[in-house]
Amino acid sequence: MGKNLYEESTPAKALFENANSILGFRITDLMFAGTDEDLKQTRVTQPAVFLHSTILALILGDSFRPDMVAGHSLGEFSALVANKTLTFNDGLILVSKRATAMQKACEKNPSTMAAILGLDDKTVEEVCASVNDVVPANYNSPGQIVISGSNQGIDLAIVLLKEKGAKRALKLAVGGAFHSPLMEPARLELEEAIKATTFNKPVCPVYQNVSAKPSVDPEVIKSNLVAQLTSPVRWTQLVINMISDGATSFVEVGPGCVLSGLIKKVDKDAVTVAATF
């Protein structure tokens, strides 16, 4: 992940080495040659994805000048660097603290997530409301929702959702119930770090996960970013709002093209491009 950037771009190499210093360990060694188990560590996964996305965006220079930005979950931090709300260094520090806080919350409250395919939002919401400690976590696209909760609660919800006609209901290989109230300890910890960080006036709006609406006020952005840890990612609604506000072409910057696929499911006519270097 990101190895080509490191090897082919001197500015990118400098940013990666700067990240190694900030994090206090050589994350580049794990990104370029680590095992799957290495990369699955929360303290590695989140900063690694952030670094790939933000460094690629910075290296693209004038060819990447968005009119609006958004990111899915962790990606919202990359989006906030792209629209200059956060500096690269501050974004990385917050992502590292976020990863550590989430890992601790996972260890405190063993929990998980499940992907639900083929049901409308209302049905999934009603089933979640009937099960203790289970909530919708990611509204990824029409007919694709991820739910979060306790291990027992997710097992029960899967059974109930299949009874309601879900085409698939699959438990995910994740360490915890992200974007749910079970992340409250992490939210409290991240809130302190975010409050202590300078958020600049962005050069373009960020459509935030919590509200699905555009934000340009640094204090609103801060508040929504804190709330994100215990609230659902409203990606479907967010994309609909971006299109309603004039977005016709989406550039995905980072590893893979998952978001491009989700955007196409929201609006088949949307133009999507995966940025490369």
Image (cartoon, rainbow, N blue to C red):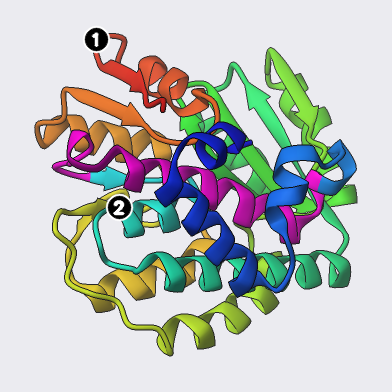
Up-down: is 24 above or below 179?
A: below
Up-down: is 120 above or below 95?
A: above
Q: Which mark is residue 128?
A: none
User: Disc 2, disc 1: CB below 8 Å?
Assistant: no
Magenta part of the protein: which range? 39-68
Residue type, mark 2 in image: Ala
| Helix, strand or loop for disc 2 | helix
Residue in view at x 62 percent, y 72 percent? 21
Residue 263 is situated, as x and y percent measured from the top left of the image, at 37, 23
Up-down: is 9 above or below 86?
A: above
User: Which one is in front in this view, the residue at disc 2 or the one at disc 1?
Assistant: 2
Q: Residues within 10 Å of mark 2 (few under 14, many from 20)?
A: many
**Residue 53 part of the magenta-drawn span:** yes
Front-lying residue, 114 or 40: 40
Q: Which residue is mark 2?
A: 82
Q: Which residue is mark 1?
A: 269
Question: If you read the primary sequence from the N terminus, does the residue marked by circle 2 or circle 1 appear first?
Answer: 2
Residue in view at x 58 percent, y 60 percent? 17
Left or right, 163 with respect to 89, comes to right
Which quadrant does the N terminus fall into?
top right
Instruction: Indicate the quadrant where residue 208 lies.
Output: bottom left
For the question of whether residue 8 can be seen, the reply is yes
Residue in view at x 83 percent, y 55 percent? 111
Up-down: is 7 above or below 149?
A: above
Q: Residues within 10 Å of mark 1 (few under 14, many from 20)?
A: few
Residue 203 is situated, as x and y percent measured from the top left of the image, at 14, 59
Residue 200 is situated, as x and y percent measured from the top left of the image, at 23, 74
- Mark-to-mark CA distance, 2 and 1: 25 Å
Residue 245 is situated, as x and y percent measured from the top left of the image, at 11, 37
For the question of whether residue 233 can be seen, the reply is no
Predominant secondary structure, magenta span: helix
Front-lying residue, 257 or 174: 257
